[in-house]
Image (cartoon, rainbow, N blue to C red):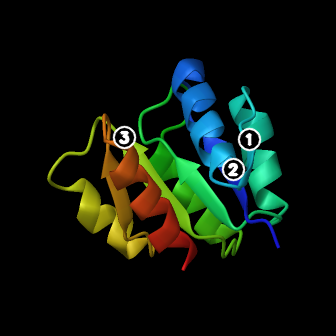
Amino acid sequence: MTKRILVIDDESGFCDVLQDLLESDGYQVEAPRQLASAIGTALLGEHDLIILDLRMPGMNGLEIARLFKQKALHTPILIISGYITEDIPQQLNTLGIHNVVSKPSGVSQLRHAVATALA
């Protein structure tokens, strides 16, 4: 069965590249452009993985991850961000998120992170 991935990121160019890459690897990828729509889609629990940026206007990735935890969403989350400070990994660990990739990252690193998060 094809794995479904939801991308939540405010950079549309990055979303397009990521979607093309992951679809070429055989995944079904959804990348809603509106944050509220993306959160609503995630809360349906129909995806095998959520790829989440940390720094976005309106609501940051940590706040979104906390919301998902409060709503008992059990979908694995992969953080991809260019703004990972020293305290971020510890905050993510408390939310049960252990998969983090820095932007920019290489294609092989990204593919490995996705495969690991889906395992």
Vertical relation: 35 (above or below) 108: above
| Left or right of 70 on screen, residue 89 | left
Q: Is 83 or 107 nearer to us in this picture? A: 107
Q: Is 37 or 19 nearer to us in this picture? A: 19
Q: Is residue 64 visible?
A: no
Mark 2 to mark 1 CA distance (whole Å): 8 Å
Q: Which residue is mark 2?
A: 6
Residue 87: name its quadrant: bottom left
Question: Could you tell me which residue is drawn at 41 percent across and 62 percent down?
Answer: 112
Residue 10: name its quadrant: top right
Pick out the residue farthest to the left.
Answer: 86
Q: Where residue 20 appears, x then y in whole percent?
A: 64, 35
Near mark 2 (Cα within 10 A), the count class, few <14, some 14-19 or many ≥20, is many
Q: Secondary structure at mark 1?
A: helix
Mark 2 to mark 3 CA distance (whole Å): 15 Å
Residue type for callout 3: Ser
Q: Which residue is mark 1?
A: 38
Q: Which residue is mark 3?
A: 81
Mark 2 or 1, nearer chain start: 2
Quadrant holding the C terminus: bottom right
Residue 26: name its quadrant: bottom right
| Left or right of 42 on screen, residue 53 | left
| Left or right of 60 on screen, residue 104 | left
Quadrant holding the N terminus: bottom right
Question: Could you tell me which residue is drawn at 60 percent across and 69 percent down?
Answer: 69
Vertical relation: 22 (above or below) 99: above
Q: Where residue 114 appears, x then y in whole percent?
A: 50, 61
Instruction: Select label 2 or label 1 by which is in front.
Output: 2
Contact (Cβ within 8 Å) of mark 2 with mark 3:
no
Residue type for callout 2: Leu
Q: Is residue 98 visible?
A: yes
Residue type for callout 1: Ala
